[in-house]
Amino acid sequence: MIVEILKIKALDLMNVAKILHQIFMVMPHYCLSSGLRDMHVVYDTLQLCQRATEMCTNIIEGMPFLPNGTIASTCDIAVCFQFPECCDKQGYFSWTSPGIGQQVLYSCLVGILCFAILFSIEYGIFSTICNAFPRRCKKEHSYTPANMIEDADVCEEKRAVTHNVSTGNICNYNLAMHQLSKKYKEMVVVDGISLGIHRYECFGLLGVNGAGKTTIFKMMTGDVKMTSGDVWVHGWSIRTHPKEVYQLIGYCPQFDALLDDLTCRETLTVFGLLRGVRIGQCKHLAKHLAKEFDFHKHLDKKVKELSGGNKRKLSTALALVGNPLVLFLDEPTAGVDPATKRHLWNVLCKIRDGGKTIVLTSHSMEECEALCTRMAIMVNGTIKCLGSTQHLKSKFSDGYTLTLKVKRFDNEESQQAAIDEIENFIKDSFRETILRERHQELLTFYITDKSRPWSKMFGIMEHARTVFDIEDYALGQCTLEQVFLTFARQQREK
């Protein structure tokens, strides 16, 4: 509409209209509407010229002084004089307006260009080109203080991964990350992570919300482009060989990505076909995974009819379709009842012992202790500690936990007196003791003094058991949760 208005001769803006017309031609909708309009103009022009010529011929044929051979040429001259558009008749595909030659050419070129862009995105050509020139993460934007001392285990892991990368022995790991970083504008959410994970290993990533766990998962699966660094799966780089990497990984997202109107069998079959499993093998695969994850009774139910626990089982089973070498599990037992959780743990332990590599995130310390052979606690996008559960508790625990149960009395005053007497004895016998929890006759103390040996501590408690009304007690290291909370306090606010 704007172009047509600018073509009005009275406005003297024909040159502007022509420039805008050429610019707008790259837009398919404008090109189509312009072509239809011009086709209609050409059609009307040809019809007008034909009718005018016929009328002229009918009039002149009755005149005796004109030879028959000159009637056609005479009518052409007369019609051209009356209608200048008929002087130079143009076909539909003429290059000059009102022909549609330009519209046809633009449509073909734009169509070819759009298909080229589509296939480039589909086959990851742009990502491969961009990943070939990684940007360096600017250290001045890092939230890690320059004077902060890095843990020795984390330094040793970085050194080992760097050595294997430089010597070309990255295939020693099933999964490796080297100087992996991600920055959103001026915020560094993942800051120089280096890890190497082997077969038969379940690695746990722990951290509060915002520590960078999910971002690492998205970079490892190729969903998010990394700012710097690289990830290798069995020697294949996610930057340069994404297709090969996708064939080797399975992913269970934090929230179930399922199609509600498909049954479990159909869902497993569809994902199997997408992973290259033959249709005949998909039926056997669906039965096997359903039996393995204990939802075979619901195999022909629609997904929307499943409980939350069975949906998590199905999502975890989908990660195993195609027999991947590395599994990424983002909180696989979130919102699952204890019985289902235990079953999933047993299945994942069996998968791990079968030679696969599992990387999981979880907020359940109990789950990490049950599944993980190694784990790392992340704070502000960096790894603060690394090692097995027992190693982390031994190295970073700040004391001991003492839980004791007082004998129950019928008289409430006697019960309270016995509890107060025991509480005073514990605080006098152990320095730096904090009463963490008191529930009826159950007391939980936190002992921060680590100087006293285990033998003396148990000796004191055995003596107290004979003197006071203590029914039972338990003395042990701080839990993994307490170690986690120690580091979690360092997490910055968003």
Image (cartoon, helix red, strand yellow):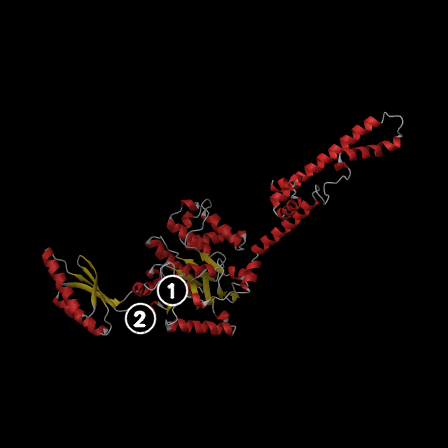
Horizontally, residue 263 falls left or right of residue 278, namely left
- Horizontal and vertical percent position of residue 276: 54, 55
- Horizontal and vertical percent position of residue 202: 41, 64
Could you classify mark 1 by the number of other residues whose Cα lies within 10 Å: few (under 14), some (14-19), or many (20 or more)?
many
Q: Quadrant of the N terminus?
A: top right
Horizontally, residue 269 falls left or right of residue 402, namely right
Disc 2 to disc 1: CB gap under 8 Å? no
In this figure, which residue is indicated by the disc labeled 1?
A: 378
The dot on residue 246 is none
Q: Nearer the viewer, residue 319 or 70?
A: 70
Mark whose residue sits in front, 2 or 1: 1
Question: Which tag, 2 or 1, sits closer to the chain's start?
Answer: 1
Horizontally, residue 442 falls left or right of residue 360, namely left
- Horizontal and vertical percent position of residue 125: 58, 59
Number of numbered markers: 2
| Residue at (77, 31) in percent of width and height | 52
The CA distance from mark 2 to mark 1 is 18 Å
Q: Name which residue type carries label 2.
A: Ser
Q: Nearer the viewer, residue 41 or 374?
A: 41
- Horizontal and vertical percent position of residue 489: 32, 63
Q: Name which residue type carries label 1.
A: Met
Could you classify mark 2 by the number of other residues whose Cα lies within 10 Å: few (under 14), some (14-19), or many (20 or more)?
some
Describe the element under mark 2 as helix, strand or loop.
helix
In this view, 187 is above or below 149: above
In this view, 249 is above or below 45: below
Q: Nearer the viewer, residue 220 or 48?
A: 48
The dot on residue 394 is 2
